[in-house]
Amino acid sequence: MTRPTSRLLVLTVLLFTAPLLHAQRERLTPDEIEYVDKTWPGTKKTSTDIRYIIRHAGSGESPKPGDRVGVLYVGMLLHGQKFDQQLDPAHPLVFRVGREEVIPGWDQILPMMKLHEKRLVVIPSELGYGSRGHSPSIPRDATLVFEMELVAINPP
């Protein structure tokens, strides 16, 4: 192959695969992105497409994999239907970070939080319950929204 022909081939491949690669990275549908942007303007996005807003900044260290954490939260579907909550400060949800005891989105967002930080977090279906859902309250392929507060960090 001559150089111009190989360059043309590379450019052609890039032209047709770039949109596909972008589509693979984005985990929310265009309608969901539009809804999130309208409902919660200014959300930030992680590399795995979790969107979040820091409602109240925390301080100190962030949890590391294996740490036991306590979290207060309200869980909702994207359009606001509540499916779960744990708001009693005396009895937060306690689990170990990075041990697959919670949905992948939580294992990813918690190491970014500081103690007593409050966030609104939008988790794509793939990082929530995915195509299986969590019957009866969470349908298949549901994007989840959490108001969450990190209230305890205990190293192993």
Image (cartoon, rainbow, N blue to C red):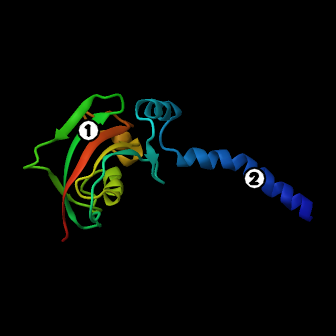
Of the 4 image quadrants, the one containing the C terminus is bottom left
Q: Amino acid at mark 1?
A: Gly
Q: x, y percentage for residue 74?
A: 23, 39
Which residue position is annotated with label 2?
Answer: 13
Q: x, y percentage for residue 116?
A: 22, 53
Looking at the image, residue 46 sits to the left or right of residue 110; the answer is right
Q: x, y percentage for residue 87?
A: 14, 42
Of residues 41 and 74, the one nearer the viewer is 41
Marks 1 and 2, the one that precedes in the sequence? 2
Res 137 → quadrant: top left
Of residues 6 and 120, the one nearer the viewer is 120
Q: Do the residues bearing badges 1 and 2 touch, measured as CB atoms within 8 Å?
A: no
Q: Is residue 47 visible?
A: yes
Neighbor class of circle 1 (other Cα within 10 Å; few <14, some 14-19, many 20+) is: some
Q: Nearer the viewer, mark 1 or mark 2?
A: 1
Res 113 → quadrant: bottom left
Q: Residue at x 50, y 30 (%)?
A: 31
Which residue position is annotated with label 1?
Answer: 75
In this rendering, is residue 61 above or below 150? below
Q: Is residue 136 visible?
A: no
Q: Residue at x 58, y 44 (%)?
A: 23
In this rendering, is residue 119 above or below 139? below
Q: Amino acid at mark 2?
A: Val
Looking at the image, residue 113 sits to the left or right of residue 92; the answer is right
Q: Residue at x 28, y 28 (%)?
A: 81
Of residues 142 and 135, the one nearer the viewer is 142
Q: CA separation, marks 1 and 2? A: 42 Å
